[in-house]
Image: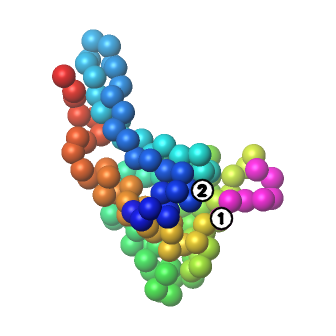
Amino acid sequence: MNRELIEKYEINFTNKVMDMGKWGKKISKIPHTNSIASSFLYGWGADDLTKEVIPQIEKVLGGELTEYETGSDLVEITVYKTTTIFYISDVGRNYPQVPTIELKELAVAWRDFLLQPPFNGDTVL
């Protein structure tokens, strides 16, 4: 991911070691960010990104689809060709937006991070 996006969205992908008590310590991959517009990444796994999210974003960018909707319990995301809007209930009508090309770069970077060892859930000594 390019340095400008890292700074713009204040994002840092980290491997956090979680103490699971008698089950040992496990890796948890986390996208640390202060940006509402990039906090959505945590809800997507590598399979979701590879099979669904990134291909659908590419279809929207390429004009094959006019929009793509996805989301979670906390946020509904609508991807349009130039802009992606995050509908979050507690922000009123001033919904966060990002350029769709930047959303794709963020999604690809998160997927690539998830696919690098150590993997999410790996046990650590």
User: In this rendering, is residue 28 above or below 47?
Assistant: above
User: In this rendering, is residue 58 above or below 16?
Assistant: below
Give the mark count.
2
Stretch in magenta = 91-97
Residue type pointed to by label 2: Ala
Please give the name of the residue rendered at 69% of the width and 52% of the height, measured from the top-left corner: 88
Whether residue 73 is visible to the viewer of this picture, yes or no, is no
Residue located farthest toward the bottom when viewing the structure as drawn: 63
Please tell me in which quadrant of the rendered image residue 26 appears.
top left
Judging depth in this view, the residue of 52 and 109 nearest the camera is 109
* Image coords of residue 76 (percent x, y): 62, 57
Q: Secondary structure at mark 1?
A: strand
User: In this rendering, is residue 55 above or below 10?
Assistant: below
Instruction: Identify the disc placed on residue 43.
Output: none
Say which quadrant the N terminus sits in: bottom left
**Is most of the magenta stretch helix, strand or loop?**
loop
Judging depth in this view, the residue of 87 and 36 nearest the camera is 36
- For label 1, count other residues whose C-alpha is less than 10 Å away and answer few (under 14), some (14-19) or many (20+): some
Please give the name of the residue rendered at 76% of the width and 50% of the height, measured from the top-left corner: 91
Is 118 situated left or right of 82 in this image? left
Residue on which disc 2 sits: 37
Residue on which disc 1 sits: 97
Residue type pointed to by label 1: Gln
Judging depth in this view, the residue of 103 and 3 nearest the camera is 3
User: In this rendering, is residue 7 above or below 78?
Assistant: above
Whether residue 23 is visible to the viewer of this picture, yes or no, is yes
Q: Earlier in the sequence, mark 2 or mark 1?
A: 2
- For label 2, count other residues whose C-alpha is less than 10 Å away and answer few (under 14), some (14-19) or many (20+): some
